[in-house]
Structures are given as structure tokens and as C-alpha cells.
Image: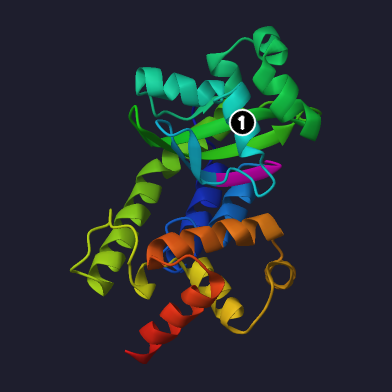
């Protein structure tokens, strides 16, 4: 698929905007908004799944029912990635026939009730334990993603991977004595920009609902971010997280 000059120009403008975004978080919200404009979609997100333990490490959508996902899933694309190791940009329609997909429990119980249908997925990494990708979704009244859309994502792949490498380097520079795989007990510098923002609001005494209203996200998204903060700081409560953040700021 040959892209047109306007396509290349749009990708170039997108990459210029991305280059100005904070380096320590590979996929900030602003990047996702820009990607959604570049490849028209109803929703777009970075996702990371732990296949072995059957859980999302990052939510596909703030209102996702994770238990339902693993009961009727995983998504046919995820299943395909794990089986083949293919990371190319693919659509749902590339891995499963339309009729079979529409009759599957995954579609009928997970996607159809919320009006979603078409999926375009750019694989980032996969093995039998974990799977990472950027996923774009359209409603059932929309047209499927095109070959042009697939080509645009493939064009972006090396730039997104380079951004991941920069983010990893930024984290190592901030905290050279801790490996990227470290879990509980990580320092405040290992938190993403959004996690630090939420933690700041927690320290101000705001509830999840108040934080959600201020950041224009759902309370469940705030809850998920806080769970990640607890894991990284090695704490189990809002108060302990706020104290750990305060101690980190004092050092």
C-alpha cells in the first residue's frame, strides 16, 4: 500500500508534536489523541496484558470488565499474536472471518453491548507471558479500518519503539541503581507523569471522583492508576502513598 503525500505530511506533523511530549512516559494521553486524529477511530489505547495470569497490566478502556474479557476472550488478535509472534498492524477481520467473529462470545458479550466492532492493532512485543500493543477501535456503524490505516501504523512503528527506548533511558538516568523490572519499593521518579499528577491530587485530599472530574477521566481510571502507584511505591493505601511521595520530595 503506497501512502499519499498528504498521508506522509500528516505523519510528519504527528511526529513533530510527539517529539515535544514528556520523554519519561512513552504513550501519554496527548499522543493517543494525536494518533486518533491520524487514524480515525472511536477509541485508541496502549495495552499490556499478562497472558499467564490473565489480567490487564494497563486497561484497554477505563470501563472495561476485565473478568468478562478473560471469560469470553482473549481477543482473537491477542490469541493470534501469542500463537504466531506476528506483530504487524492487523485488523480483526484479518484474523477471523466476519460471520465467525459476530457469532463468537467475545463479540456478542464484550464488544456488541457497547457498540464496538472493528479493531486495528499494532503489536509491540509478545511472548507466551505478556503482550503489548496499541489498539484502535471503531463502532459497528463505521467502516472497517483500511489498508491505508494499516500502512500508517507500520510507518510509525520505529518511531514508537524509539520513544519507548528514550523513556527507558530517562528512567534509568533518574534512577540508575534500579532495574526496569523492579516492583514494590520503587522511587517516585519511576511514576508516570499521569501517576504523579494523580498522587499530587491525593496529597491535596481529593477523592477519586473529584480527581476524575478534574482530569476528565473516569473514577475507575483513577483507581487503576492508584493501584499502579501503590505497587511502585510498595504501599497499600492512599495515606501511605501520600507520605511516601512527601518523603521523596523532601530528599
Where's the C terminus, which quadrant?
Answer: bottom left
The answer, for residue 16, to whether it is visible in the render is: no
Name the residue nearer the viewer: 10 or 39.
Answer: 39
Q: Is residue 117 rendered to the left or right of residue 74?
A: right
- Which residue lies most toward the left here? 177
Q: How many marks?
A: 1
Res 188 → quadrant = bottom left
Name the residue nearer the viewer: 58 or 86.
Answer: 58
Res 147 → quadrant = top right
Per the picture, the main secondary structure of the magenta-coloured stretch is strand
Q: Residue at x 53, y 77 (%)?
A: 239
Residue 66 in magenta stretch: no
Image height check: is 146 above or below 5?
above
Residue 230 coordinates in the image, percent (x, y): 46, 64
- Which residue lies most toward the bottom here? 250
Image height check: is 7 above or below 163?
above
The answer, for residue 56, to whether it is visible in the render is: yes
Residue 183 coordinates in the image, percent (x, y): 33, 57
Give the residue number, with chain letter if any, for mark 1. Answer: 69
Residue 43 in magenta stretch: yes
Q: Residue at x 30, y 67 (%)?
A: 170
Res 247 → quadrant = bottom left
Q: Callout 1: helix, strand or loop?
A: helix
Q: Give the range drawn in magenta.
A: 41-45
Amino acid at each position: 500500500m503506497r501512502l499519499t503525500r498528504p498521508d506522509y505530511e500528516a505523519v510528519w506533523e504527528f511526529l513533530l508534536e510527539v517529539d515535544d511530549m514528556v520523554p519519561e512516559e512513552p504513550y501519554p494521553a496527548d499522543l493517543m489523541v494525536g494518533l486518533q486524529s491520524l487514524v480515525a477511530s472511536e477509541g485508541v489505547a496502549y495495552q499490556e496484558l499478562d497472558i499467564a495470569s490473565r489480567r490487564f497490566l494497563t486497561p484497554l478502556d477505563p470501563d472495561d470488565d476485565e473478568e468478562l474479557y478473560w471469560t469470553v476472550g482473549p481477543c482473537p488478535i491477542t490469541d493470534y499474536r501469542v500463537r504466531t509472534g506476528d506483530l504487524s498492524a492487523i485488523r480483526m477481520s484479518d484474523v477471523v472471518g466476519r460471520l465467525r467473529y459476530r457469532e463468537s462470545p467475545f463479540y456478542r458479550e464484550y464488544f456488541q453491548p457497547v457498540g464496538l466492532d472493528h479493531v486495528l492493532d499494532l503489536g509491540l512485543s509478545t511472548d507466551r507471558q505478556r503482550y503489548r500493543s496499541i489498539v484502535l477501535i471503531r463502532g459497528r456503524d463505521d467502516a472497517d479500518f483500511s489498508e491505508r490505516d494499516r500502512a500508517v501504523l507500520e510507518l510509525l512503528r520505529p518511531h514508537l519503539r524509539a520513544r519507548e527506548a528514550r523513556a527507558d533511558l530517562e528512567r534509568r538516568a533518574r534512577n540508575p541503581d534500579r532495574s526496569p523490572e523492579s516492583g514494590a519499593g520503587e522511587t517516585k521518579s519511576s511514576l508516570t507523569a499521569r501517576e504523579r499528577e494523580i498522587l499530587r491530587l491525593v496529597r491535596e485530599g481529593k477523592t477519586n471522583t473529584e480527581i476524575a472530574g478534574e482530569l476528565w477521566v473516569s473514577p475507575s481510571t483513577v483507581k487503576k492508576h492508584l493501584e499502579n502507584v501503590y505497587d511502585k511505591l510498595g504501599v497499600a493505601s492512599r495515606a501511605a502513598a501520600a507520605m511516601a511521595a512527601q518523603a521523596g520530595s523532601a530528599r
